[in-house]
Amino acid sequence: MMTPVASLAECEAGLAGSLGACARLVEQALDVLLPTPEGAEARLTEAMRYAALGGGKRLRAFLVMEGAALFAVSETCAARVAASVEMLHAYSLVHDDLPAMDDDDLRRGKPSAHRAFDEATAILAGDALQTRAFEVLAEPDTHSDPQARCELVAALAAASGARGMAGGQMLDMLAEGGTLTAAEVTRLQALKTGRLIQFSAEAGAILGRAPPPQRLSLAGYGRDLGAAFQIADDLLDAVGSTAEIGKTAGKDAGSGKATLVALLGVERARAQAELLAEQAAGHLDGFGRRADMLRQLAEYVVSRRS
Amino acid sequence: MMTPVASLAECEAGLAGSLGACARLVEQALDVLLPTPEGAEARLTEAMRYAALGGGKRLRAFLVMEGAALFAVSETCAARVAASVEMLHAYSLVHDDLPAMDDDDLRRGKPSAHRAFDEATAILAGDALQTRAFEVLAEPDTHSDPQARCELVAALAAASGARGMAGGQMLDMLAEGGTLTAAEVTRLQALKTGRLIQFSAEAGAILGRAPPPQRLSLAGYGRDLGAAFQIADDLLDAVGSTAEIGKTAGKDAGSGKATLVALLGVERARAQAELLAEQAAGHLDGFGRRADMLRQLAEYVVSRRS
């Protein structure tokens, strides 16, 4: 007899519970791994903790944890990698919000780091969050095999440097007020947010020393999920309220930001996001039921309302 | 028969030649290792290259190369680590020069990155230089043993994060206009510049898988050399000209920056720097004549005029 398929509502409840549990786990890991506010430089470590703790859906952390679970990686090791990715992500948000960049006063429902502290502190806190992310990956507790740790460092760096996230943010700055084609917007978003989401999905395979085809499947999943997620995020910005999304809504249109929503319209953009989410789930066929949570996540990212 | 001791002039000529050769070598390594300006995001990679290429004495690179030579490490591997440290250093200069930080228009005799490009590009270029520094260290070409590569990543991160360079810059920002004691200034400088110089001196021992006492000796050398170097730098700021030092002179006093020169006066500060340089050389006793270039460097950093 086949296991009965869970209803959509049951799936969503299960996913919400898993996301919540993962968020609590990574919060604890971050609390332990972030430097404590001590010494005369405590303002810096306070700002790092302010930016990295207590916020966000922890989507990237969830991808790391679920990917690692496919290969029976220890939860302690996976949580260190999840925390590391969240530090890297937090650094990028702190710097993106700076007055010289997107100039945003609100992040995750509270004042952005340069508003809560000041610009210099925010720049330094972002810098030191990036540094700590790589340090955690390189430390022996992350994996007994230093080869796996080096691969994690190199892969996270590739995803977040000039040919990844930072390059994407550069494209985003250059695009403001200009006109990009849909292909250009797609590449911008693949770099700016896609690469880090792809790394998060792949990290479990690196930790689990998985054979290349499995790592490639997870990378494909992450790539398509990231693309779907970004369109969904832009849809929320276009149609959501500031209170719902925890950051300034309608900002993209106001600043002339290049998004697929602006280029294709809400309906076509939504259809594209849904197609990408289906495509993402398709990469998981080889993993059987163990990947159900990742499949549900793909549905969730395009249906979420905040 | 003992090898005759070289005259001071001969030593200085030898050191200058070695520094110059090392600077050319690391310049080549940086040119190869930095991303090339391609694609729509070329502005970012151009800014990274602008900030990291063609400037500076390459003191940190020289420490890496000379330290590595003590353990017969391949020059190719050592040059990658040297380039990585210089990228990290370049990132810190780009961010320190930002309007929200030290607000400096001049660096290494040319416009600072945010003046040559713009603030957003400078922030991103600094970010991506840091990322690339860790990526290079983690890549297989840096060392055949991944354990050594992980140690390099973790040690560079420890030297440059919240408990190192970034923490020191935070202290520096907090100190502006205030009054620090000599002990507080010493700690600030140990974090802000000392830790990275210490890492540079130690890196060769990590690459060479040297026994702990030898690594500790090089770390001690780097620590004292870094302290001497910083006082010498502050002396140059106090008594040098902008043309000689390639950045705005007299800036420390103007901005009320905490320096030992301001606290102790020029003569006592100079004496302190010379004492530290002697102390630095003292750590090299176990290495014999092979460490002569590092000894000469200790003399040079406190006698240089630019």
Image (cartoon, coloured by chain):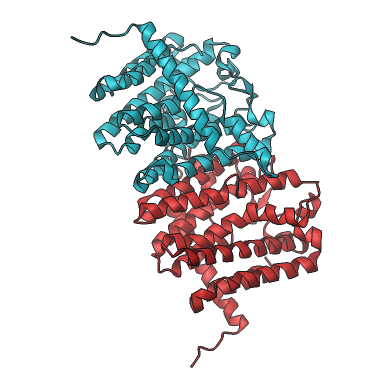
Chain colours: A cyan, B red
- Above or below, A245 against A72 in this view is above
Answer with the quarter of the image where residue A111 lies.
top right
Q: Residue furthest left?
A: A1
Where, by quadrant of the figure, is residue B114 drawn? top right
Which residue is most to the bottom?
B1
Residue B188 visible? The answer is: yes
A100, A63: nearer the viewer: A63
Q: Residue at x 60, y 29 (%)?
A: A97
Count all numbered tags in the image, as a single digit. 0
Rendered location of residue A31, percent (x, y): 55, 33
User: Which residue shows up at 28% across the image and 23% down it?
Assistant: A284
Q: Picture quarter containing residue A91?
A: top right
Residue B17 in the image: above or below residue A193 = below
Vertical order, A46 against A226 (above or below): below
**Considering the image in quadrants, where does the C terminus of chain B appear?**
bottom right
Q: Position of residue B158 (x, y in %)?
A: 54, 49
Closer to the camera in the image, B69 or B107 = B69
* Vertical relation: B18 (above or below) B60: below
Q: Nearer the viewer, residue A65 or B73?
A: A65
* Residue B130 appears left or right of B144: right
Q: Residue at x 35, y 37 (%)?
A: A207
Q: Position of residue B232 (x, y in %)?
A: 70, 64
**Residue B126: image x %, image y %?**
56, 44
Q: What residue is shown at x 51% (from left), y 42% (from top)?
A: B128
**Visible residue check, residue B35:** no
